[in-house]
Image: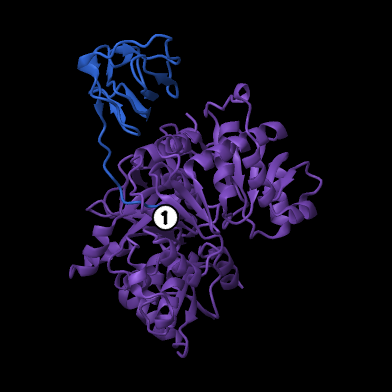
Chain colours: A purple, B blue
Amino acid sequence: MNIALLLEMAAEAAPDRVGLVCEGRRWTYGELLAAARGAFELIRQSDVQYVALLDESSEAAVIAVFGAALAGVPYCPLNYRLPDADLAALLARISPALVIGDEERITRIAGDHGHNLLSREEFSLKVQETVPAEDAREYDPGEGVAIQLFTSGTTAAPKAAILRHSNLLGYILGTVEFGSADEADAALVVVPPYHIAGISALLSSIYSLRKIVMLPAFSPEAWLALVAAERVSNAFVVPTMLSRIIEAMERLGGTLPPASSLSSLRAIAYGGGKMPIEVIRRALELFPSAGFTNAYGLTETSSTIALLGPDDHRAALASQDPKVRARLTSLGKPIPTVEIEIRGENGEVLGPGEPGEIYVRGEQVSGEYKEKSALDAQGWFPTRDAGYIDEHGYLFLSGRADDVIVRGGENMSPGEIEDVLLTHPAVADACACAIPSLEWGEAVGVAIVLREGHDAPEEPEIRDLVRGRLRSSRVPEKIVFLAELPYNEMGKLLRRKVKDVLAD
Amino acid sequence: MKPGTRLKSAACDTEVMVIRCAEGTIECGGAPMAEARPADAAPLAADFSAGTLMGKRYVDTEGRYELLCVKPGKGSLSVDGVALVVKDAKPLPASD
C-alpha cells in the first residue's frame, strides 16, 4: 500500500476543500493530488534513485513526498542548515537524485554528482503543467521505501534511516481517524521538512482533512500572527520555539494581536527535546483554553510512540500530589498501537520504576537503516534512549543511553542531576556529563549557565545542593560556567560538545 | 489476494484497500469483490445494503480481515456471507 493513498482519499472525499496554505497561496486537495501526479511523471522521466529536497517548508515538500511515493522513489529531505562539507557528503550518498531547492548551492558543492536540479519555483510550476498520460499511470504499489532521513548525527556520523510505506501507513491508519477534522480546523506546521515531525504532520493533517498552514521560517512574531490570521486550531512546536513564543508574548504584551485572536488555538503539541518545566507551566497559563500534548517519538519510529495528553497536563498542574505533578515532565503513555518495554544491560525486561533502555515494537517502527536493521529477532527496536516507566504506566525519559554516567559501576542519568541544579536561583541552564576519572572510571562534570544578574555560586554551595537531594556519588567533581550551552537548531543539546569542554 | 490489493464492489461504488485478509471471499452488497468492476452490475442484496463509509476500517470478529474503505457506496461488506463491522479507533489527541 502506498502513502499516496492518504492524499488520494482526501482528494476523493473533498477535492475542493483547501488542504494547504503556504505564503498566501491556497491549494485544494484536488490540486495537490494533480500536482503530485505531475511530480510522478517528472520523476519517472528523470530516471533517478532519490528525490531530495534542500529547502525550507513549502508546497514543494507536500508535492514531492507524494510524487516520489507514486513513482516508487525514496524521498529524502535534507537539512539545509548543515555546513557545505557535511551536506556534500550526504548528496554523494543519494546520487543520482532529483534535487529540489537551492540550485546555486547544490551546483557549488555537489555539481559533479550527476544530480538533476530544480528550484522550488520551477518544480512547483512544472508539476502543475505536467499531466501523466492515462496509459502511463503505473503508480508504485508501495511495497518499498517511502522516505529516507539522515539522522541528526549528534553522537556520530549521520545514519540513513529508512521508513517504508507500511511503517508510515501503520502510524497514520492506526492513530488518525480519516476526515475527522472540522472544515475550520487548521494545523500550523513550522517544523522543517527534513524532520520526522515535519513529515508526519503533513501525512496526519491530510488524512484527517485538517488544513495545513505552513510557516517556512520560524519567528515567534510570525507564528503568533499566523495563528491569528488563519484561525489556527492545532500546532506542533519544539521546546525552544515554545519558550521563544512565551518570551515574545511577555515582552511584546500589548503590541501583539490581542489574546482573543489566539482563542482558535485548541491543541498545542510539543516534542523533539526536553521541555523545561517552567516553560510548560507558563504556557498552560498563557493558553488557558488550549490542550497540551507532549509527543515522544524518533525518526526510526515514524514519529509519535508515546504521548501525555491534555487531561494529564491539567491534572498535573492542579494536583497537590508530587507524583501527579511530576507527570508534567513525563512522556505519557505508549499509544495503543505500539508496545514499550524498559530493558536492563543484559536485555532483561525491567519492572516499574527501574531505569534502563527504552525498547519499542509496532507496525510503525522501522528501526531500519540503509546499511542494516537495528531490530532484534522479535521486532523490538532499541531506541538508545534511557528511561523508566512508573507504577501507573507513565514513561519518563532520562536522556540518551550513551549519555549515562557510569561512576564505579553505578549508572547515573544526567537529567536527575540537572533537575537539581536548575532549582538553584542563579542557574539558568545546566548540563551534566561523564568526565574521565582515574579512581572511578567516570565521574560527574557539570556545565552551568548563570541567570542574568546573578553571581556564580561558590562550588561547595553547588556540591551541597546536589548532596542534599541525591546520593553523594552524584556530586559533581568538576564545575564550569559557560555563557551558553550548545544546542542544534531543533533545540537538541549537543552533549558531546559539553563533554569536550569538561574534559579539557 | 494480499494486503495492498484494491477491491471494487460489483454492486455499488464501494472500493476498499485490503489491510489484512485470509482465504475467504470478500463481498460487498452481497456479491464478491474484485480488482475490476464487472460490465454488468450485480444486484444489491437487501441484507447487505447498509452502505460503507469513507475512511472507516471494517473487520471480522476473529481479526483475520481488515478492509479500509477508500470510496463509499450503498453496499455493505461481508466475508463468506458474514457481515464485517466497523473497527472503532480510539481517538488520540493530535500529536504532530
Front residue of A372/A139: it is: A139
For image coordinates 21% across by 63% down, the residue present is A315
- Left or right, A386 with reference to A486: left
Q: Quadrant of residue A242?
A: bottom left
Q: Is mark 1 on a helix, strand or loop?
A: strand
Q: In this view, does B96 lie above or below B58?
A: below
The quadrant in which the N terminus of chain B is found is top left
Q: Is residue A83 above or below residue A351?
A: below
Residue linked to disc 1: A187
- Left or right, A246 with reference to A158: left
Residue situated furthest left in the rendering? A320
Front residue of A81/A370: it is: A81
- Left or right, A127 with reference to B73: right
Q: In this view, does A77 lie above or below B66?
A: below
Where is residue A94? Give x, y as percent.
Answer: 68, 41
Residue situated furthest right in the rendering? A112
Look at the image and tell me whether residue A72 can be seen.
no
